[in-house]
Amino acid sequence: MSNFITVLKKELLDIVRDRKTLVFTLILPILIYPLMFKFMSSSMEKAQTDIEKEINIYIYGDTDSLMAKTITALENVKTPEVESPTEALKNGDIQLIINIPENFDENIAAGKNDTIDLLIDEESNKSMIASSFVNDIYDNYKNTIVEQRLTANGIDPSILKPFEVNVKSGINTDNDNINGVASMLLTMIPTLIVILMVSSTVGMAADLGAGEKERFTFEPLLSTSAKRSSLLWGKITALCTVSFLALIANLAAMVFSMQKFMSFGEESINFNLEPATILGMLVVGCLVLVTLSALQISVSIYARSTKEANSYLAAITMPTMILSFLPYMMDAKGINPAFFNIPITNAICLMKEFTVGIFDVKHIAIVIGWHLVYIVASIMFAKFMFSKEEVIFRN
């Protein structure tokens, strides 16, 4: 046990002394998240503000109709002359093309139905916002026409609205507001946890194995009185410890930045995470972390250099990221039971259930059972690699 503690201290000190690791793993993400989310929020607000200031549109067809004049009369609507409206829309010179049928006013006055086409660029946020803006105006105008027709025929316009439907939250005990943005972002956290874990461990894992070989400190370490099992456990524990601290720091910075710097109009972002949810996600995250750390240490020991180790570690990183994105769009309350048997994916599925307050004992038992198997298998593989002289002294 004393040898294990000694090795653990030595590895932790080596990691702490490596300023690049501290900067890129702990400090840089904490600084980047506030800037990133502030930039995202500012970009969305700017797109909305730009549309409110000026919308460039092109009108086809009956340009003298009341519908055309209703739009062009607005101060923020401009109608620039363009040779090719389609190309102008594609290039972003205009945000919207409105196609109004000929004799539109006469058709409406005669009680006929007609259709106005709004042509948008679905690849442009400004175009999408502009279409919503114009569509709302036309909807209000359409309702006005309907009310006028009903009134002219002696019918009360309120007959069209016999009742109202209010959509409220049925599970939020504090208030009945629906916090849709927070719920959407909350479902991202389990996937981000795994991605942050696997990305933060790669550099350190390469240094703990292949890096020691490059510095010629691995052979002297093996010649000490410490058993190889103590060396292995010391390296795995050191990697898990620093990665776990990096994970906590990253998540704390991420959640704080989302709540502090992101806004969607008047809707605030509030995450309501119960202590049981946080604890459950940390436990599952630790199980995944031990498996990944053991596998990464095994690969790093096999590599001749840190460059080679990073290449090999990509074989672990890429499949892990792919598996972590599988349940990304799944409804946490309707996950197929088969996904609880897929490595990495099952951990994310379980954490997604935790975020919505589901603590299914069967699912918890299945996922923890599988991860105990993964941990045992990965550690046995690491011990096997550590016991092979041709692996350790591979040149």
Image (cartoon, grey):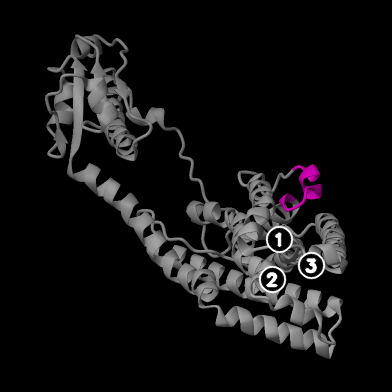
Q: Are marks 3 and 1 in contact (CB under 8 Å)?
A: no
Label 1 amino acid? Ala
Q: Position of residue 235 (x, y in %)?
A: 74, 75
Q: Position of residue 264 (x, y in %)?
A: 38, 54
Local packing at callout 2 (Cα closer than 10 Å; few below 14, some 14-19, many 20+) is: many
Q: Is residue 351 above or below residue 276?
A: above
Label 2 amino acid? Lys
Q: Is residue 36 left or right of residue 14?
A: left
Q: Which stretch is magenta? A: 336-345
Q: Write the residue at 35% across / 58% down.
A: 39
Task: Look at the magenta stretch and give its main secondary structure.
Answer: helix
Q: Is residue 14 above or below residue 35?
A: below
Q: Position of residue 99 (x, y in %)?
A: 25, 18
Q: Residue furthest front?
A: 395
Q: Are marks 2 and 3 in contact (CB under 8 Å)?
A: no
Check residue 171 in the rendering and tell me which mark sits there, or answer none: none
Residue situated in front as seen by the camera: 358 or 385:
385
Q: Write the residue at 82% across / 87% down.
A: 3
Q: Earlier in the sequence, mark 2 or mark 3?
A: 2
Magenta stretch contains residue 346: no
Judging from the image, what secondary structure is the residue with disc 3 in? helix
Q: Which residue is mark 3?
A: 392
Q: Are marks 1 and 2 in contact (CB under 8 Å)?
A: yes
Judging from the image, what secondary structure is the residue with disc 2 in? helix
Q: Earlier in the sequence, mark 3 or mark 1?
A: 1
Check residue 213 in the rendering and tell me which mark sits there, or answer none: 2
Q: Is residue 352 visible in the rendered structure shown here?
A: no
User: Could you give the CA–CA distance between mark 1 and mark 2, rounded to whole angstroms?
Assistant: 9 Å
Local packing at callout 3 (Cα closer than 10 Å; few below 14, some 14-19, many 20+) is: many
Q: Is residue 78 above or below residue 277?
A: above
Q: Earlier in the sequence, mark 1 or mark 2?
A: 2
Q: Which residue is mark 1?
A: 303
